[in-house]
Every structure is written in C-alpha cells, then in structure tokens.
C-alpha cells in the first residue's frame, strides 16, 4: 500500500468512527497544537503523539566548535565551521507498536 495522505487518513478515521471529516481534522489540528506547546522550551520536552504508539522527545544537540579535521574519504585536513547548539525533535515507536509490527 502506498503512503497515505492526511486527507485519506481523515476520511478513513471519519468512516471508522462515524464522526464527520471536519471533526476528525479538528482533532488532528488540536493534537498538533498541543504537541508544539508541550515540546516548547519551557515544557517537559516529551509528548505522546499517538498514546501507546509514537512519542516525541526534544533533544539538545551540543554546539560544535570551529577547527581542523581530517576528511575520512580524501584523508586531507579541512577547516570545519562552528555550529551552535540546537533543539532537535526525535520520534520513537513504543514497545506496543514494535511488537505489533515485528
């Protein structure tokens, strides 16, 4: 089966639950807003996107200083640019989903 679009998912869930497509789309919108709020800077940094299936965590990637490094492919020394620290969102499957799939 090909990758499902958002509208296909909304239509399928509306059919399965008996709710309107507008209501299902509103639930997805509210879930997205809640995820953004919970993953914000002053929040816990962890959110169950689909409880029991997928969770998201914010990880802080450390800053990388500028300096020289050896390119492993060409074996030549090169200058590396400095990169600031940044927040990265990581998604992971829960144990229940892993067992169901595999």
Image (cartoon, rainbow, N blue to C red):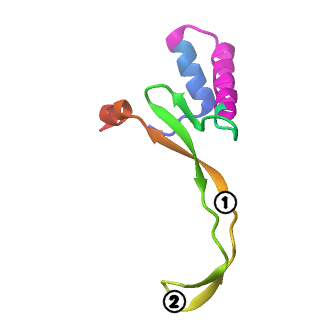
Residue at image point 43% right, 38% down:
93
Q: Can you name the residue that lies furthest to the top here? A: 18
Height in image: 99 above or below 67?
above
Residue at image point 68% right, 34% down:
36
Q: Nearer the viewer, residue 20 or 26?
A: 26
> Along the horizontal axis of the image, is 93 left or right of 34?
left
Tell me the residue that label 2 is attached to: 74
> Along the horizontal axis of the image, is 7 left or right of 101?
right
Residue 36 in magenta? Answer: yes
Tell me the residue that label 1 is attached to: 85
The magenta segment: 16-37
SS of the residue under disc 1: loop
Image location (x, y in percent) of residue 74: 51, 89
Q: Can you name the residue that lies furthest to the bottom here? A: 76
Q: In which quarter of the image is the N terminus?
A: top left
Residue at image point 69% right, 38% down:
40
Asked if the residue at tag 2 contacts the one at tag 1, i.e. Cβ–Cβ closer than 8 Å, the answer is: no
Residue at image point 53% right, 20% down:
12
Q: Which of 82 and 93 is in front in this view?
A: 82
Label 1 Cα neighbours within 10 Å, binned few <14 / some 14-19 / many ≥20: few
């Amino acid at each position: 089966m090909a990758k499902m679009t958002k509208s296909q998912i909304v239509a399928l869930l509306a059919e399965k639950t008996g709710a309107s497509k507008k209501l299902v789309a509103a639930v997805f919108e509210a879930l997205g807003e809640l995820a953004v709020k919970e993953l914000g800077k002053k929040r816990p940094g962890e959110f169950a996107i689909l409880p029991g299936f997928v969770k998201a965590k914010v990880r802080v990637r450390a800053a990388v200083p500028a300096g020289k490094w050896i390119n492993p492919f060409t074996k030549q020394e090169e200058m590396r640019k400095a990169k600031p620290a940044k927040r990265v969102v990581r998604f992971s499957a829960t144990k229940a989903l892993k067992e169901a799939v595999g």
